[in-house]
Structures are given as structure tokens and as C-alpha cells.
Image (tube, rainbow, N blue to C red):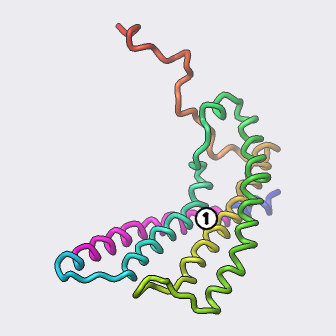
């Protein structure tokens, strides 16, 4: 288990570095968008390449940060239901979700994206928009994002098993974000 936890820590470190680094891509996308708007208004010029560059930057930020979001336990879930269970049951729900939903989906996406990106790269696929960019980098972003998510999924599964077997403390104890319904005071009952 120690070797698996070491592998998990390595994945988490890489995921955190990438996740925090790509946050800057949002700023770059905003600057590209603003620059494109200014050039379009002042010089009455525009380019589809700048618009597509914005999409690539935002897509990269989203796809590369998905694994980091998973590592931080920040993906959306139904807290109303999830929060009603004990922490042990929550771990079982997470483990079940990672093994039977996340990993099959991510592995399926990797299976389909590898030839999809390869074909695009070999053919030199270019955007159908006039002056657009080459397409394979955008497709490669998707592939790399799902690859990161697959590795982070493996890390999360290792950590869940380690927590449930007592080999690791829970790094992200769940704290419900909603007050129980019994604690909510109706507005007319307040003093």
C-alpha cells in the first residue's frame, strides 16, 4: 500500500502543478478576447484565428483543471443526498462512482480520442473557418485532459481504499454545505 500511496502522491503533485498553472490560461484568453475586440473596433479587422485561439485556451484551462478539481474533491455532487450519509458510506459512494462511472467513461474517451487525434494530426486538419487554426492541438487538449483525469481517478481510488482500510487519514473530510432542514428557521418564526 505504501508504494501505491507514493504513486498517488506523485499523481497528485503533477495534477496540482498543472491545475494551478493552467489558471493563467483564463487570463490569456481574456487578453486575446479583449485584443481581438479592440482591433476589430479600431482597425475594422478581425481574424477567426484569434477567436479559435480563445476557444483553445479556455478548453485547455477547463480540461487540464478537471483532474485538479477531482483531486480537491470539488466536483459537483448532490449534497442533499450525499450529506445525509456517514463519512464511511460517502467513501463507498465515491469509490463506487470512481470505479464504475468515472474510470469507464475516461478510458472510453481515451480509447476514442487516440485515433481521433492521430488522424487529425496526420491529415493536417485545419479549421473550416477562413483563416482558422489547425485542429489537432484542440483535439490533443481533449486527449491530454482525459489522460490527466484517468491518472487522477486512479489516485483517488488508491486514496479511498487506503482511507477505508485505515492506511491513510481522510485528507478532505466532508463538511455539509447545507444546514439540516430541522435547523432552518422559517422567516416568520424569527424574533
Q: Picture coordinates of residue 179 (x, y %)?
A: 52, 25
Q: Identify the main secondary structure in magenta.
A: helix
In the image: residue 145, left or right of residue 105: left
Residue, disc 1: 13
Residue nearest the observer in this picture, 188 or 151: 188
Q: Picture coordinates of residue 93 (x, y %)?
A: 74, 41
The quarter of the rendered structure image containing the C terminus is top left
Q: Is residue 136 above or below residue 185?
A: below
Q: Is residue 191 above or below residue 42?
A: above
Residue nearest the observer in this picture, 85 or 41: 41
- Tell me what residue is drawn at x 70 percent, y 64 percent: 150
The quarter of the rendered structure image containing the N terminus is bottom right
Q: Is residue 161 above or below residue 147?
A: above
User: Magenta residues?
Assistant: 11-38
Q: Quadrant of residue 88?
A: top right
Q: Quadrant of residue 7?
A: bottom right
> Which element is circle 1 on?
helix
Q: Picture coordinates of residue 155 (x, y %)?
A: 72, 59
Amino acid at each position: 500500500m505504501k508504494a501505491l500511496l507514493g504513486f498517488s502522491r506523485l499523481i497528485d503533485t503533477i495534477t496540482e502543478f498543472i491545475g494551478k498553472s493552467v489558471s493563467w490560461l483564463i487570463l490569456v484568453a481574456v487578453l486575446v478576447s479583449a485584443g481581438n475586440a479592440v482591433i476589430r473596433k479600431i482597425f475594422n479587422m478581425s481574424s477567426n484565428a484569434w477567436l479559435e485561439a480563445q476557444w483553445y485556451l479556455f478548453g485547455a484551462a477547463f480540461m487540464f483543471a478537471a483532474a485538479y478539481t477531482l483531486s480537491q474533491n470539488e466536483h459537483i455532487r448532490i449534497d442533499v443526498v450525499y450529506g445525509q450519509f456517514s463519512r464511511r458510506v460517502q467513501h463507498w459512494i465515491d469509490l463506487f462512482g470512481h470505479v464504475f462511472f468515472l474510470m469507464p467513461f475516461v478510458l472510453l474517451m481515451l480509447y476514442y480520442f487516440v485515433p481521433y487525434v492521430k488522424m487529425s494530426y496526420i491529415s493536417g486538419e485545419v479549421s473550416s473557418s477562413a483563416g482558422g487554426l489547425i485542429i489537432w492541438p484542440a483535439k490533443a487538449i481533449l486527449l491530454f485532459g482525459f489522460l490527466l483525469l484517468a491518472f487522477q481517478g486512479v489516485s483517488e481510488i488508491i486514496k479511498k481504499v487506503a482511507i477505508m482500510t485505515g492506511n491513510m487519514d481522510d485528507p478532505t473530510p466532508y463538511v455539509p454545505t447545507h444546514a439540516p432542514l430541522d435547523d432552518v428557521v422559517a422567516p416568520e418564526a424569527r424574533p
